[in-house]
Every structure is written in C-alpha cells, then in structure tokens.
Amino acid sequence: MAEQTKTATLTIDGQSFELPILSPTSGPDVIDIRKLYAQAGVFTYDPGFTSTAACDSTITFIDGDKGELLHRGYPIDQLAEQSHYLEVCYALLYGELPDADALEEFEALVTRHTMIHEQMHMFFRGFRRDAHPMATMVGVVGAMSAFYHDSTDIDDANQREVASIRLVAKMPTIAAMAYKYSIGQPFVYPRNDLDYAANFLHMCFSVPAEDYVVNPILARAMDRIFTLHADHEQNASTSTVRLASSSGANPFACVAAGIACLWGPAHGGANQACLEMLKEIGTVDRIPEFIARAKDKNDSYRLMGFGHRVYKNFDPRATVLKQSADEVLELLGVENNPILQVAKELERQALADPYFADKKLFPNVDFYSGIILEAMGFPTSMFTPIFALARTVGWISQWKEQLADPQLKIGRPRQLYLGDTARDYVDIEKR
Ligand code: SDX
C-alpha cells in the first residue's frame, strides 16, 4: 500500500478538511478521498474518470505525455521486439519474467488447456451464422461458468489459478471457432505441436480439405499483435472486469463483461471502425474531406484510430504496429496496399494539422492493427475478437490482483442527482 507523503487541505464554507496525499512508484500523486463523504458530506464529481484513480496496481504503467507503456516495469517496445506473448502473459500474471523452466512449464500448461468442452460446440450452434463474432464470444465466454463450474470459486486460490489458465488457453480456440462458425466452415481443433499464435492461425485458416502450413513470419506478427494488446492499465474494459469482480462474480462472467465493453467503437471496436473508415476514404485525395469532418464541431464524426484518453503523445504500440505493417505487407507482396497508403497519408496530414496537434490526437493501437489483420486474411469483424483474445490476460491479471487486495470492497459509485425532489403520486385521472 502507498504511504502518505503529503496532505491536501479542502476548505468548504470556511471549514477545512485534511486529505492524505499518496505517492506512487511512478506517475501523479493521488488525493485519498475515501473518508471525504464521511468527513465533509460531499462527493467528488468525475464522469468518465478523467482524474480518478479507481485502484492501486503494480501491473502496467502508462506515461501518456512521454508515450511510455511498461508491463511489470518492462517497456512495451522491448517486450514486442525481444519477448513473446506467453512470456508476457507470465510476467503479467505472476509479476516477473519467467526463467526457462518456469516458462516451459507455463507454456505446456496453457497448451494442454486449449481445447474446450465438446458440449460447447453445441452452444455455438444456437447462434445465427451471421452473428458478429463478438456477440458469439460474449455469449460463449459467459457460458464457460456453466461448463467449468469447478473453477468459479473466487475464494479458492487453486480455482482462481485454473480459471486464469483456462481463459488464456481457450480464448484463441473460442475466437477461432467464432470465426469458423461465421463463415460456415467446420471448427478446427487446436494442436499441441504449434505455439500459441501459430495455433490460432491454424484454427482460423486450416480446412479439412488440405494441409495448412503456418507462415512463421505471420505467426510472429500475430504473436506481436497479441503482446501489444495484452494489458493497458485501467481502460474501460479492464475497469468493467474489476467492477464486475468486486461483486464476487465468477471470472468467466467478469471476462464476458469485459468483452462486451471492449466491443464499443470508442474502445476495442475502433480497430474495425478504423479499417472501415480507411476503406470509406478509399483514396488519398479524399483525406481532406474526412479530416474536415473530424474537425467540424457540428459533426460528431471522429477519425477512428486517433486520440486516446491517456496518450497525449504517440501510442508506443502504434509505433511498433506501423513498423509491423510495413514488414507484413512487404512479406505478403502487398506493400503497395492502397489502404496502407491512405493510412500513412492520413496520419501525415492529421499530424500536420493544428487541430490534431493542439488536441494531442495521435494514432493509437487501433490505427495500424486492422491493416495488418486484414492483410493476414481476417475479416474486419474478427479484429475486435482478436483484441479481446489478447486482452484476456490483462483482464485476468487485474482480476487476480484485485481479489488479492485485503481492502477489496464492492464498487459502488455515487452521483450528482439533478432529478425531481420528492413529490406525491398522482392518479391517472388527474394527470
Ligand atoms: C483503445 O483506455 C485505453 O487504454 C484504451 C486502449 C486499450 O488498450 O485498452 O488504448 C484501446 O480504446 C484505444 C482508443 C480507440 N478509440 C478510437 O480510436 C476512437 C476514436 N477516438 C476517440 O473517440 C477518443 O479519442 C477516445 C475515446 C479514444 C478518447 O476520448 P476522450 O479521452 O474522452 O477525449 P475527448 O472525447 O474528450 O476528446 C478531446 C477532444 C474533443 O474535442 P473538444 O470537445 O475538446 O473540442 O479531442 C477531440 C474531441 O472532439 N477528439 C477527436 C478524436 N478524439 C478526440 N477529434 C477527431 N477525431 C478523434 N479521433
């Protein structure tokens, strides 16, 4: 727990209240207002939580001004370049990078939990084939609590561990099944001789009619995309998972809530919305028209993949993904992809425009990811399911951290009430 280093004094109607200030390892100090309402009878007001720390955490740190992202202290660019997704998962879940034996044991454990209960195949078949894969994932992951009831007791440390491994291991299988179901192809079982990212590509793109050989460069790009999406401090979907978990809900229900929240175009749904925007722009000569709309105060239109609540500099993940986009598209022989050209020119023009510069609106993680995913053969409807797959380890790491907090209380925000004061019921004849 952070120590009090200073004191803030709040004066209301001549009465002063002292509030402890707690200092972090990195980042801004926080004013501890836990006793404010009891002492001063007032709430704080912060819709959207722009100035509110909802918890303390040791997992991920973001410096939005510097464009810095650390997972357990390790910079995201170093992890993307030198590590791989399951090693990052280990660090997020357990706090340290694993040694060789621990990593081998962890990867073997995840590999042997990738299959899902055979009855869940039936569950998939209740959906329409044209259901959005995110709808399928919300439903199927929520239903996991019915199929894996033996790892739903959040007070049992072993069950928490089993649920964590099951979720990290099974999300690629579920996401791939959602994809296969949506295109009318048979489900493909995971294979234990493939690594995590290669297995996902295998489950998505292999068919019974012929052998499918995973391209190692695409598998590396897929793994890097997973790593870049693994966790991101207290974003909307992670906060949703934490709030759901604070009531004692089981991990599968909490992750299903996180998937639902991630789906929104302001959050994880932005990767799909961004590619759809780039396709709507179509050619570089139409870029000024879209930039003008995004700048128009009377138009709610926004450039998808731009802006961020925390980053007021480049999103470091976008920087890595931009480089990956060049590599993957060159490998696939589509380096002259018109959509990539539109994206790069849109980025150049937006960053040269005072509106975006003044508001510190830079490309975020969703700006380039869709270009790579489409080049790899995924439909736009699979972009956010892939984000959800990758973010599951972040949700679960934060879920475990919160459950280990002895001060855990159910999350229950208050409000600024602007409705009617008390009034008597009126019979319908008198209305
Ligand atoms: C993710 O939180 C996380 O960490 C999320 C995430 C993660 O890993 O979990 O990083 C993943 O969700 C990335 C963000 C993906 N979303 C998009 O790309 C959608 C487009 N971006 C915007 O909707 C917006 O930038 C948000 C939602 C990302 C952030 O919104 P904020 O912080 O609430 O900022 P805001 O809406 O108050 O905007 C500030 C100003 C406004 O103008 P003014 O009212 O001050 O005049 O900037 C403008 C906005 O109109 N603005 C944009 C813009 N984003 C903000 N104008 C044009 N295009 C945009 N994209």
Image (spheres, rainbow, N blue to C red):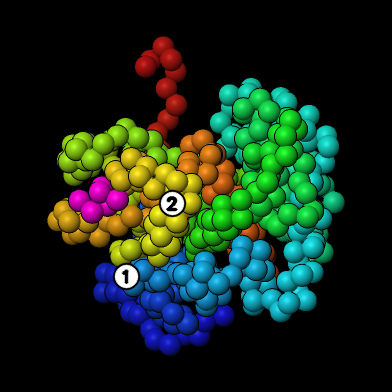
Three-letter residue code for mark 2: Glu
Badge 1 local density, few (<14 within 10 Å), some, or many (20+)? few
**Image point 61% across, 50% down: which residue?**
215
**Does the magenta portion include 342?**
no
Between 312 and 200, the residue placed more toward the observer is: 200
Between 48 and 428, the residue placed more toward the observer is: 48
Q: Residue furthest front?
A: 333
**Image point 57% across, 37% down: which residue?**
134
Where is 37 relative to 288, above or below?
A: below
Query: Which secondary structure type mostly characterizes the magenta part of the structure?
Result: helix
**Image point 52% across, 81% down: which residue?**
2
Residue 328 shown left or right of residue 173 in the figure: left
Where is 289 relative to 94, above or below?
A: above
Q: Find the magenta span and give its range.
A: 344-350
From the image, state whether disc 1 or disc 2 is nearer to you: 2
Residue that mark 2 sits on: 330
- Describe the element under mark 2 as helix, strand or loop: helix
x and y percent of residue 366 in the render? 42, 50
Three-letter residue code for mark 1: Asp
Say which label, 1 or 2, has the lower sequence index.
1
